[in-house]
């Protein structure tokens, strides 16, 4: 039988472990249209570093290296406390986003983008957010007009979410 005392110590240890998890939350979780802003909020980062960074991903299940953008957490004035938030607009790419915080230091292998800027490393994930989506069914987008071979005809192309019958007036 496990003595009660060691059970309590184990319990304290587990509680301590979970409280050192970095929390990462987003609000809102659904944006109504392209260009609306999301606020990303984090807390309980131990020993915050000015190289800790936030990557954004779309589709949400992209691999760590395929971030479509990133921002250093030190852009938030409160980053040294281990908590902070950043807000930025997102383009509707017709798939969900998610956000991930990584710890990077300059001993990570060097990778460069096409413009030979250094890209931050993704070997140490600290936290990952929930998914963010865009509201559906807000009418056609990406409308494209074109003439056809007939003088009295015009082609209208557009993208809708629902695939139901649509009319052009
Ligand atoms: C976001 O961070 C700013 C400081 O940059 C702070 O004043 C504000 O209270 C924070 N907002 C939330 C919702 O935490
Ligand atoms: C840098 O990162 C590597 C791998 O994540 C780690 O082993 C090393 O201790 C870090 N160095 C510093 C100075 O934090």
Image (spheres, helix red, strand yellow):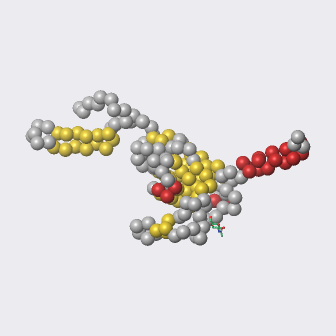
In the depicted structure, whether residue 121 falls above or below residue 11 = below
Q: Position of residue 98 (x, y in %)?
A: 52, 48
Residue 136 in view (yes/no) = yes
- Please identify the quadrant where the N terminus is shown: top right
Query: Is 100 positioned to the left or the right of 32 in the image?
Result: right
Query: Is 81 positioned to the left or the right of 164 in the image?
Result: right
Query: Could you tell me which residue is drawn at 45 percent across and 47 percent down?
Result: 59
Task: Give the image quadrant in which the ligand numbered 2 is located.
Answer: bottom right
Query: Could you tell me which residue is drawn at 37 percent across and 32 percent down?
Result: 162
Residue 76 in view (yes/no) = no
Query: Could you tell me which residue is drawn at 54 percent across and 63 percent down?
Result: 121
Residue located farthest toward the front when viewing the structure as drawn? 1
**Which sits in the foreground, 32 or 3?**
3
Residue located farthest toward the top when viewing the structure as drawn? 165
**Which sits in the foreground, 83 or 4?**
4
**In the rendered picture of this protein, how many numbered marks are placed on residues?**
0
Query: Is 162 positioned to the left or the right of 129 in the image?
Result: left
Q: Position of residue 23 (x, y in %)?
A: 64, 49
Query: Could you tell me which residue is drawn at 87 percent across and 43 percent down?
Result: 2
In the depicted structure, whether residue 45 falls above or below residue 92 = below
**Which sits in the foreground, 162 or 123?**
123
- Please identify the quadrant where the C terminus is shown: top left
């Amino acid at each position: 039988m496990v003595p009660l005392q060691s059970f309590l110590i184990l319990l304290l240890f587990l509680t301590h472990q979970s409280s050192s998890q970095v929390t990462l939350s987003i609000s809102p979780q659904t944006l109504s249209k392209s260009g609306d802003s999301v606020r990303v909020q984090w807390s309980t980062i131990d020993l915050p570093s000015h190289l800790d960074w936030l990557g954004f991903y779309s589709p949400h299940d992209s691999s760590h290296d395929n971030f479509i953008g990133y921002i250093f957490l030190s852009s938030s004035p409160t980053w040294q406390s281990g908590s902070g938030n950043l807000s930025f607009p997102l383009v509707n790419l017709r798939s969900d986003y998610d956000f991930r915080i990584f710890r990077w230091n300059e001993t990570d292998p060097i990778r460069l983008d096409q413009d030979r800027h250094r890209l931050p490393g993704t070997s140490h994930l600290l936290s990952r957010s929930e998914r963010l989506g865009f509201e559906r069914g807000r009418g056609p987008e990406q409308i494209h007009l074109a003439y056809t071979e007939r003088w009295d005809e015009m082609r209208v192309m557009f993208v809708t979410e629902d695939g139901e019958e649509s009319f052009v007036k």
